[in-house]
Each structure stands twice: as structure tokens, then as C-alpha cells.
Image (cartoon, rainbow, N blue to C red):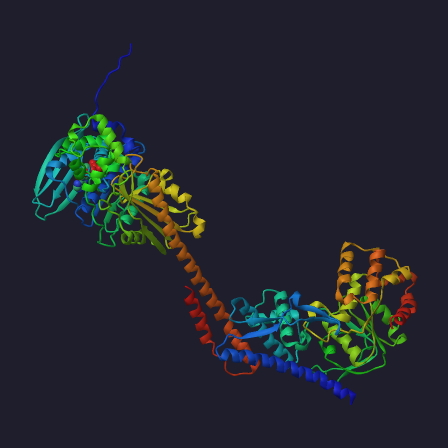
Amino acid sequence: MERRKRKSIIMEKKKEVLTDLENLGVRIYEQLDRGYFPSIEMPSRSTENIYYDPQVRQFILGDRKVRRNARNIRHLRPFTQLVWTAFFSHELTSQRKTSTLRDVYYSAQAYEMSFKDQQESNNIITDLETVLGFSREDFNIFPEERSAIFGDLTIEYTVPGYEGRTLNLTSHPDGVMIGPALTSSEFVKTTADKVIAIEKGGLFTRFIEENVHKKFNAILVLTAGQAPRATRHFIRRLNRELNIPVYIFTDGDPWGMHIAMVIISGSANAAHLRELTTPDAKWSGVWATDIVNYKLPTDPLDEVDVKRLYELQRDPRYKDPLWQREIKIFLKIRRKAEQEAFSRYGLTYIVDEYLPAKLEETK
Amino acid sequence: MAHTTFEEISAADFFYRNRDIAGFTNPSRAIFAAVRELVENSLDAAESLKIPPDIYVRLSYAGEAGRETQVYKLMVEDNGIGVPPRHIPSAFGQVLFGSKYKLKQQRGTFGLGGKMAILYGQITTHQPASITSSTGMSKIYTYKLMIDIQRNRPLILDRKVLINKERWRGTIVEFSLEGDYFRAMPKILEYFKQTAMVNPYANLTFVDPKGRLYKFTRVTKEMPDPPKETLPHPYGVDVELLQRLIQVTPYRNMLEFLKNHFHRVGEITARKFLEFSNISPSKNPKRLSHEEIVRLMRMLKKFKEFLPPDANCLSPLGEKLLRAGVLKELKPEFVAVHKRRPSTYAGHPFIIEVGIAYGGEIPKKGSFLIYRFANRIPLLYDEASDVSVKVINSVNWRRYKVTPDMPVAILVHICSTKVPYKTVGKEFIADRPEVRREIANGLREVARQLQRFLTRRAHVDRDRRRLGIFSKYLPKIAQFSAKLAGKEKQPDIKKLLRSVKRFGAEKT
Ligand SMILES: Nc1ncnc2c1ncn2[C@@H]1O[C@H](COP(=O)(O)OP(=O)(O)OP(=O)(O)O)[C@@H](O)[C@H]1O
Ligand SMILES: [Mg+2]
């Protein structure tokens, strides 16, 4: 019963995406057919129009709009590219095929729609996201980078050929890749009561080896550096649909902090999108405080680290006292530490001592 | 002890000794100058009757001379006015004899050119010249003559009279000379081309020593109005001229003298001037002392109220013919021409005509092609010293979006009863502020026109590019939006493309 309802959410969304794409086509078609230069309006993504909304705890776009008009010769090319991208996304979604950003770039050439470079095609995809308010994964377009998941969660595929098949995410000791098939799958059942997101592959493997998933009843997610959007969306789903807390472990430096923050509050680049954030997720470490308390082996902060810390200090997403405190301590001790630093106390120390302590502390 | 001997030399002797001032500097210059002087005489001869000139020039090889020079036979035939038989010997055998000492615009001025060519031929080959001419009456006269250099007199060696059954009219001059045609060739061909440019109503035919034929065909029979003869303007006179006028005048008082011998001086102006200069109107001009003549000249120049000289003694080519000439010889994409209003320097009227041509067959040289003309004669030497070149270099071309790397040709033509040549060789124009100003103003005018053309063309290009872009993308928008909307039929974008075109057309 519960399951049926959730499944329809995924299907409903696919339908909605298709309808919106078709409506976009109809709008342009009709303008052309009536002898007008077609135009499309969308929220502006310029920095002056990006605001931090403390309510939804993420960046959002303001009221400013931009209009792409085919009458304007400078708009003509990106306009055409946008229409093509919408058409291509519709093909993908309706045929239930996926494509990488790179594929899109090359596919365009088959339609004599060349993009100058990958960046240009990525930008147009972002435009389409902004126009329709869906993220590219909803159009079945995925980035190259892949992260992984491991833990007691059973999913059911919705991709063609696998519909109805289920998989338990402990079935492969390296974890399961968070790809298009997984992101479009339904959650069937789980015994886990938390999610632990980990920045680095080494620690992810260690946690699996050390049975962290069992010991802590956790689903483990490897972000592999900055978490891809699909992964951020997936973490959000774990949090929302399974109703379990999320804890994030990163390196103890400004870059690690920010990996956690983007999972929690999103990035300015995705201000036009919702459902990529997990506002209740917790950054559990490695904190500057931990560096001091656990007497971790450290490296000195270099210039860019310090500069980055000052930037974060002013960033609206960091105004919470915990973050501010940690930034200050980083700046005071002028040191940083990697997650691997715990190995100085033996390989299992991090699992036996640090992890439970921090899970408790950030509960 | 050295002692000084005094002797008198004739005009012929003087120019024989100083032939380089007339342009006969070396074997290649000499052959160019000879062709040029005879062609110009022929053009004058046809134009004075307002007949479109037909000129045939043949230069043929006649034997080796020195190591680098050959002997050539030069023959020039025209359909001009012809020379009356009694004047033929002097016109071609006596230096400083001519019919063009009058105050009107003509190519010839000094009574020297044709003779210098014949003289040069005579001293290098010791052969007589042959002149055949008819004014279109019943007879044709042929003279064989040489110039007696010491006495500046023609030596007639032979004379033939033929019955002119066909009523032929014109002149044929033929003589031998030494020269270096192969050095001179580029200049000679350039000379013909440029002559054709400012004489678009002329047929010029040239057969060179290798038998190659160069033909410059007229594109019009229309000719500029011939110039009228005029009296000297008071601002342009000198003591010498005053003395000559006083000698020949039949008038016995200053008022009549001024009224009848000067250009633009009537009763009122004459009286005002005499009052201004404190000269009695009844004074007999023949009684003026030398000091009084000098004073008269000074006062004439000082008096501010003489009207400027009339320009009907000038014969500019006119904008229509100038344009035709440039189009015919340069085949440009664009040409702008401009004729300035008449102006004067030192009492001599002059008119500046300028042209600017762009693109087409004009080559890109990294600098402008400059064509200079005076009284419809191309000036091919000493370009750097010419006033036109100085003015062209002083114009701020960038203001007009014109740069030297563009295929641009600039043409400057000065017409005057007295072209301010720097030398008897008639190769470049002296720098007179009045002339300079007129050239500069003319150039600005045509430069503006070129600028307008270039901007317009840039617009047209831009519009064409625009249309190209729209034609490339609109069909795609139509195609993909139709597919996306699930429509069978593509939307009609012809109307939109038409509106892009119209939008472009409005702009120009
Ligand atoms: N082809 C011709 N047809 C008719 N008359 C001619 C021809 N060639 C020369 N003459 C006459 O002979 C005269 C002398 O010619 P010449 O070339 O020696 O002097 P010019 O033309 O008067 O002056 P310049 O020294 O400037 O050439 C001319 O003034 C003209 O009257
Ligand atoms: Mg002459």
C-alpha cells in the first residue's frame, strides 16, 4: 500500500516532466505559427538575483526574469539550442533512455546543432532546468561522476528491462553505484535508522569492512568529493522517504566543510532547483574542535584555505553558531586534518571511538 | 692671364644645353617625354575644335645605338586642327614659338615641348623630322626639317604638297631618337592609362617596338566645354606684363586702359581703383615712369575690391566625365568625384577636381594609389614633392574610416591658366596655400562619400549575415518545436524571414 503510493510519485513526476516539455514545444510552435518571433522567459541566474532563503535553508532565485527572444540575433543560437535540448530531453525521457552531459554534447552534432564546447551545452541544460524547474536528472541527463551507496536498503528498479526487479544494497561489497537506474528506483524496505555520508573512498571501504552499517544500523553513502546532484537528491530522498537522519563525515578543512554544507543547503549554482538539499543533515566531523580534542596529526593551512575560510565566514549558509565557531577555531589553530588522520590511533579507532562519539554529539 | 669671353646663345641652344629641365634627363626619361609632348600637342589640337581625339602612336625599333640605348622611330598621328602650312616650320623647328601663349587653359604653355622632342631626336640621331599636316582644306603639306640650334631657326630640307582628296585633317609627326624603351615602358603605359582616365572621350592607340598593341577606347563623345581666352587679372600681373600692355595699348587714358586690358575690371571698379591708388583717370598710360609702373603693380595687388577671376577660361573635366574616366580605367567598386568651385592664387584662376575610388580592380598596396593631373595631363614623376601628396598625407583618414591597407585610389586634378609647376618638365605642382586648401576641402568631401559608402556596405553585409543566421536557426526552432509539440506540420516561418529582410532593407 505504502509502496504503491510512492511508486506513483516517481511515475507522476516523469509524466509531469514530459508534459512540461511538450507544453514548451507547443508554446514556441504557436508563437511561430502566428508569425511572431518566439520568446521564453525564465528567472535570471545572475548573482544579483541569487538570495539565501533562511526559511527553506537554501539559495533561491529572486524575481528578476530574463527573456530569450528569437528576434534578438544574439539570443537566436542559444534559443535554438534550448529548443533542441528540450526536444532531446523529451526523446530521452519518453524512450526512458539516459544520457551523460558528454553524450548530449555529441548528440547535438547529429542534428547539426553543434555546441561550441561542453561548457556551452551544460549551460543550455541549466537553462532548460531553469525554464521548467526540473533538474537535468529528471530529463535523464546525468554527469559523469558517480558516487556509491552501501547498506540494508532494498530498492525496486523502474528502468526498462528491470521493472519490478529488486536489489538489496548490501549485495556488493564495493557498494552500488548511484547512477540513473538507482536514482529512479523505488525504496522497498530497510532496517537502517540513519545515513552516514562519507567524503572519501578509502574510509567508505573501511566502514564497510568494519561493518559500520551493521554496528550503527546505517546506510553508507560515498560522496566522492563534492556530491553530485543525483547523490544530493538521493540523500534527500533517504532522509524524507525513509524518515531517517543524515550524518556527514568529511576532512577537517574548509573544503570538507563545504562538501557537507552543499548536501545540507545546496549551492548557488543550483539556486533555480529544489529538492537537492537535506536541511536537517548534520555535519559530524572532522571539526576543528576534533583536531584539538583528538590531537590529530595535521598540516598547516595554506593561503587558499585561509582565504576560503574567510569567504565561508561571510556566507549566509554558515551563520549557524556551530559553523561560525568551527571556522574561528580553524583560523586560530591554522591547521587542518584528513579523515585518515585517525589511523595514528590504530585502524579501528575511528569506528570504535570517534564515530559513536560524534554520532551522539550531533544527534 | 685668363680673359673672359662673352657670347649670346639662342633659345634653342639654351634648351639644348639644359635639356634636363624640360624632362629629357636620360635615355629612358627622354623617350617618355617625347611621347608625352607629342600626345599632348595632339590632344590640344583636337580639343580646340571640340572633336573627340583619335590619336595613334607608333614606336618602332630602328637599330642599336649604345650599350643600353636603341634608336627608335616615333610616329604620332592625330585628327586635330592641323597646322597652317606657313607655320609648320616654326611650330616644329623654332623653340619658344607656339599658339598657346594665350590666357586660357591648355596643356601646352611654353612653345617648347614638341621642339624639345625633335631637338633631342636630332642631336642623338642626326636625322630630320618629318611633319605632315592639313587643316582639312584642299592640300596636305609634308616638311622635312631640322633645327638650326645656334640660330633657333628651322632648316627646311624638303617640302611636299599633296592633294587632299579625302579632306583629311590632322597632323603626323615622325622622327628618330635614341632611348631606352624597356626602361621607359612602365611609365609610358601608365601615362596612356592615366591619360585615358582624364580624357575618357579620346581613343588612344599605341603600338610599341615589340609590335604590341595597346588600345584605350573612348566611353563617351561628350567633351568638356573648351576654355575661353581671357584677359590678365589685376592680381596676377607683373611689371613685365604691364610694360608690354602699355606698349601695345591704343588707349590714351588710365580709365580706358584698365577697363580694356584687365579681367573683371569695369567702369566702377576702375574708378574706385584709381581713386584708391591716387592716379588720375585721365593720365596717359604711355607717360608712366618706370617707378610709377612698379607702384601701379603694387597698388593693383593691394586693392581689395577686384572681383575674383572668372573661371570660364578654365576647362575642368567635370564630375560626370571624371567619374566615367575612373570607372573605365580603374574599374572600382565605388567612386566619388567632386569638382570644387573656382578659386584663385596670385590672380590666376584654378579649379580642383578630386576623386576617390574603392575596391573592384584597385589593388591593395598598403598605401593609397595616387593619381595626379594638371590640365588633364598625368603627372608621373616626383610624386613625393607634389602638393597633392602632401595634402593627402595630412588628411586624417581614420576619421573617415579609411585606412591605407584598403584598396583605395585618390585622384587630384588641377586646372588653371597657369598651373603652378615647379619645373618646365611639368611634373609636380608647387605648394600654394590656396591650392592646398582647395585640394584638402575636395578630399574631405569625397572621403565623406566613401565613408558613407563603406558604412552602408557594412550595413548591407551585416544584414546579409543577419539573414544568414536567421535562415539557419529559425527552421531548426520550427523543426524541434513541432516535434516537441507533436505536430505533423511545421510552422510557417517564411513571414518571419521576410520581416528579417525588410528590417535589413530599412536600415540602409
Ligand atoms: N599636333 C598638332 N596639331 C596642331 N598644332 C600643333 C600640333 N603640335 C604642335 N602644334 C602647334 O605647334 C606649337 C608648338 O608646339 P610645342 O609643343 O612646341 O609648344 P606648346 O604646345 O605651345 O607648349 P609646350 O611647350 O607647353 O608644349 C603649338 O603651340 C601648336 O600651335
Ligand atoms: Mg606642346
Relative side of A63 to B396, left or right: right
- Displayed quadrant of residue A145: bottom right
Percent of width and height locating residue A186 = 75, 82
B178 in relation to A49, above or below: above
Relative side of B434 to B133, left or right: right
A104 in relation to B393, above or below: below
All told, the count of numbered labels is: 0
Q: Nearer the viewer, residue B109 or B278?
A: B278
- Split into quadrants, the picture shows ligand 1 in the one at top left
- Displayed quadrant of residue B16: top left
Quadrant position of the N terminus of chain B in the picture: top left
Q: Nearer the viewer, residue B361 or A295?
A: A295
Percent of width and height locating residue A255 = 78, 62
B127 in relation to A289, above or below: above
**Residue furthest bottom as drawn:** A1
**Residue furthest top as drawn:** B1
Determine if residue B172 is in view.
no
Relative side of A218 to B251, left or right: right
> Which residue is at a point 25% across and 43% down the rendered structure image?
B307
Determine if residue B187 is in view.
yes
Percent of width and height locating residue B67 = 31, 32
Quadrant position of the C terminus of chain B in the picture: bottom left
> Which residue is at a point 43% across and 47% down the rendered structure image?
B396
B112 in relation to B401, above or below: above
Percent of width and height locating residue A105 = 62, 69
